[in-house]
Amino acid sequence: MVTKAMSRQVRTGAEPTPVVKRLHKVLIANRGEVAVRLIKACRELGIATVAVYSDADRHAAHVLEADEAFHLGGSRAVESYLHIPRMVEAIRITQADGVHPGFGFLAENAAFAEAVTQCGAEFIGPSAEAIRLMGSKTRARQLARKLGIPVVPGEDAIEQSPESFAAAAERVGYPVMLKAVAGGGGMGIRVVRRAQDLSADIASARQEAASAFGEASLLIERYFERVRHIEVQVVADRYGNAVHCFDRECSIQRRRQKVIEEAPAPRLESRLRQRLADAALSITRAVGYSSLGTVEFLVDEHSGEFYFLEMNTRLQVEHTVTEMITGIDLVKWQIEIAEGVPLGRSQEQITFHGHAIECRLYAEDPQDSFAPAAGTVLHWSVESAPFTRVDTSMCTGAEVSAYYDPMLAKLIAWGRDRGSACRNVTHLLDKTDVLGLPTNQRFLSRVLRHSVFHECQTSTRYIELHEALLTAPLDSAELTRTLIVAALQRWRTQRDLAGLDNRKRTYRAHAEQLTATITIECRAGDRYVAGIGNDIFELDLLKEDDAWLTVAINGHAMRHSVVSNAEVTWVSAPGVGSVRVEFQSRFSPREATDLTGSYRAAMTGRILDVLVQRGSRVRSGDRLLTMESMKMEHTTVSATDGVVSELWVTPGTVVEKGSLLIEIDDSSAGGDTLIRGRA
């Protein structure tokens, strides 16, 4: 069904004469998949591109895709992608006449927009004044109130002292949300349910906000337990014309960061959809906005009310689903608006057809509180299909750095209705292989197959309410198949090694909650017998091709991607995602386990603060240190009472996953305790 837009664009006074200045070379002030996406749009418009990169991104895809590239500095964002003077130098040296900031980093930094303009280039985004106004959640809330648009209850004009926050929290009523005044993307946000946690969460949110946006100020809002997060895409030009491109549902979030988005928002009553669009355009016009923008709302279905949340003055990660349903390339449109081209479309000319869903594929471990992961992508493969799209910078051999956001790719699919879109994106997800580090692939697959999702009953607490089901380990049958495939692949890679039995071998392996001894015996040709405990399995290797094995186990054939690295083998299967299988060597003893009370890093990252000293007495639940990994702050807490006996890190230390951090003497501790980061 094609749906007509519901509000007319408003024009006041005589139509200004357009002044168009075509761009010839655009510097992409970003990295990763968004940089690749922007390079593609520029190429299709006949515009040359300049990539920028840090030490960690020397061999990244966006560097190789662009016509030119400029080295910014060190791996940390503050040394590279957030370093405005170095960005300005890149613009000057490459003689770029346009700059696109993408999303994140400097995309909503008014000082950067001004710096770009001052060096003679066109900033592909709104004016610095609009960024400054709407980039401040405090000022944005005040503007919305003036326009008669309801805002989330809270206090924004607040002194930044602990006492002021404590008093404000009591007035607003727990639970409350601390939120960074600047920026977005879920950074600098903490939900506080108890007064005794407020002080520590203020410090944590400030640290994260300062690191991500260079601004530590916070505001406080009421935290709604069950609401929907719905946003409206707006587009405006320099001549007073503004339109919307409908709405998106973004309720499925973890750590206040979106995971699955769809357009249009399902199960949204037409009158409410109209009110959201009108409110979004009202704010857009009041700001004198020119570019792409997104106005975000919380919708309380119980009361039928909505609340203005914020305006993102940039391209959104989830712009893809709007493009899929409208057929409009929003990035090209944004570039043309920056060149001075009028919108060229009235509201009545913008329609949508069908439904689109986007999944964000992250390098993270859902079974470990979605802790981010870093490392090498040992195998990457995506099978294209009709009505699908993949935005990524990944390839086999790519490095996922601990310095940046852990998003690997966006998987997007369109369908004539929501059910078709869900089926198409699920199929795309199942046909995506990424091996070498943990991902949320299985988690996404379970969300897409969950009855609550299909019934459109999700809210911003969906993951929290269903986390146990969505992050549960594989069942024993799935793990057994995984171990058999891993053992078979290991047998075949070792079959020519001297001194080993070339007919029958035994392996000891561990995957998730299962540890088992697997025997693989070659019978004839590509036929084998596998034994696990008292169970015997007939194997038939139907096809072997690069990183894939097609294996029939007791007559049931499946295609698996398999890749090994030292003593670890990664196995992937449709609907399962990748599984890490660790083989235990028969020839060398395993490392002795750590002493009781040792704390190791569960991820690669940088130590921000150490809250204890050697000799400090700590109690269970005390905070020991904070570290930053992939743009998020994580806190290590003591699992026991005791005394700090050894301290192996200091603020600023960069640690690898598994590095020893702290040791606590406690005779009652029951074994090793690994750091568990809590955002």
Image (cartoon, rainbow, N blue to C red):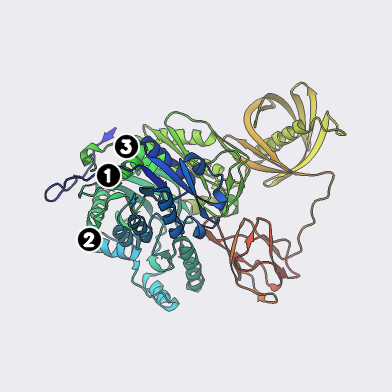
Q: CA distance from mark 3 to mark 2?
A: 30 Å
Residue 366, how many percent across, how many down? 57, 50
Q: In the displayed structure, would residue 32 be above or below residue 429?
A: below
Location of the N terminus by quadrant is top left
Q: CA distance from mark 1 to mark 2?
A: 37 Å
Left or right for 492, reference 369: right
Residue 316, how many percent across, how many down? 39, 48
Residue under label 1, please give it: 21
Residue under label 3, please give it: 326
Q: In the displayed structure, would residue 671 be above or below residue 51?
A: below
Residue 217, how many percent across, how many down? 41, 69
- Can you tell which of label 3 and label 2 is closer to the viewer? 3
Q: Residues within 10 Å of mark 2 (few under 14, many from 20)?
A: few
Q: Looking at the image, is mark 1 or mark 2 earlier in the sequence?
A: 1
Q: Looking at the image, is mark 3 or mark 2 earlier in the sequence?
A: 2
Task: Find the residue positioned furthest to the left.
Answer: 14
Camera-nearest residue between 392 and 491: 392
- Can you tell which of label 3 and label 1 is closer to the viewer? 1
Residue 281, how many percent across, how many down? 24, 51
Q: Residues within 10 Å of mark 1 (few under 14, many from 20)?
A: few
Camera-nearest residue between 134 and 300: 134
Q: CA distance from mark 3 to mark 1?
A: 27 Å
Mark 1: which secondary structure?
A: loop
Camera-nearest residue between 126 and 306: 126
- Can you tell which of label 1 and label 2 is closer to the viewer? 1
Q: Residue at x 39, y 68 (%)?
A: 220
Task: Find the residue positioned furthest to the bottom.
Answer: 163
Q: Are marks 1 and 2 in contact (CB under 8 Å)?
A: no
